[in-house]
Amino acid sequence: MDKVKEVDKAKEWVKDKENSNLNHIKIMKTGYNNTIIYLFLISLSILTLPSCNNTKSESKANSETIIKKEVVDSIGKIQFEQKCVACHGFENKTEEQMIAPPMYAVKRRYIKASADKDEFVKMMSFWVKNPQPENALMRDATKDLGVMPHLNYDEKSILEIVNYIYSTEISKPEWFDAHEQSHKKI
Ligand code: HEC
């Protein structure tokens, strides 16, 4: 039997089979094509590897740490904006419209009261979990604005937010210096 006949026979046989069989053959074919693509990609990456090796492993580790820090910070930032800024933010608000002290002032007060980052985080998260007048550092604010409501946030979120507050620069409202001066005069 010559080759052409053999192929024709095979074609007939395939036609007689159910679709699943046909599909199976198709999958095998594409699998073969994919192998070629993978081989091509692998050889391409081997060719380009030496240029990556030029970067020192030290700076690679550094950039990984920076990326990790950025991810942690952005999780904290998003939650801070969702959960604290409504009251502690000053964007689009005059001094009179503020219902809580700006976070700039809150952070400054907590930095003053704590020895290091760990203590800062511990103190501020304790407050968020237990906002009672006797725990307040900013007694004037409690008197003027009423005590902060208890927010039912989980421990993890609170820690992420408070770490973010510590590590980021919180901006100061334009009116803040004048506000402080007027308080000192009283
Ligand atoms: C519904 C409004 C509101 C929200 C939301 C809010 N706060 Fe407050 N917060 C206040 C008010 C009002 C005060 C000032 C009165 C006081 O000290 O209780 C305050 C005060 C504080 C203080 C100073 C407490 C002290 O020692 O005197 C800290 C710290 C604080 N908030 C952290 C946060 C953090 C962190 C978030 C977000 C997770 C947050 N707050 C969300 C209203 C709010």
Image: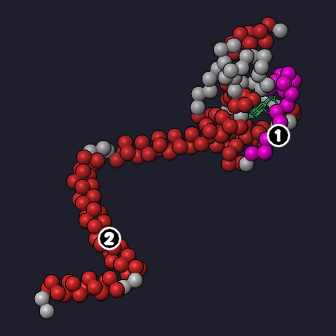
- Residue of label 2: 31
Q: Is residue 175 above or below residue 116?
A: above
Left or right: residue 142 versus residue 38 is right
Task: Give the residue displayed 73% in from the left and 40% down from the top.
Answer: 125
On the image, the x and y values in percent for residue 17 come to: 36, 85
Q: Which residues are magenta?
A: 138-153
- Residue of label 1: 150
Residue 130 in view in this figure: yes
Residue 70 within the magenta-colored segment of the rendering: no
| Quadrant (top left, top right, bottom left, bottom right) of the N terminus | bottom left
Given the current orientation, which residue lies at the most extreme left position? 2
Left or right: residue 129 versus residue 76 is right
Q: How many C-alpha atoms fall within 10 Å of the one at disc 2: few (<14), some, or many (≥20)?
A: few
| Quadrant (top left, top right, bottom left, bottom right) of the C terminus | top right
Q: How many C-alpha atoms fall within 10 Å of the one at disc 1: few (<14), some, or many (≥20)?
A: few
Task: Give the residue displayed 62% in from the left and 23% down from the top.
Answer: 171
Q: Amino acid at mark 1?
A: His
> Residue 167 is drawn in which quadrant?
top right
Query: Could you give the CA–CA distance between mark 2 and mark 1, rounded to whole angstroms?
Result: 59 Å
Q: Amino acid at mark 2?
A: Gly
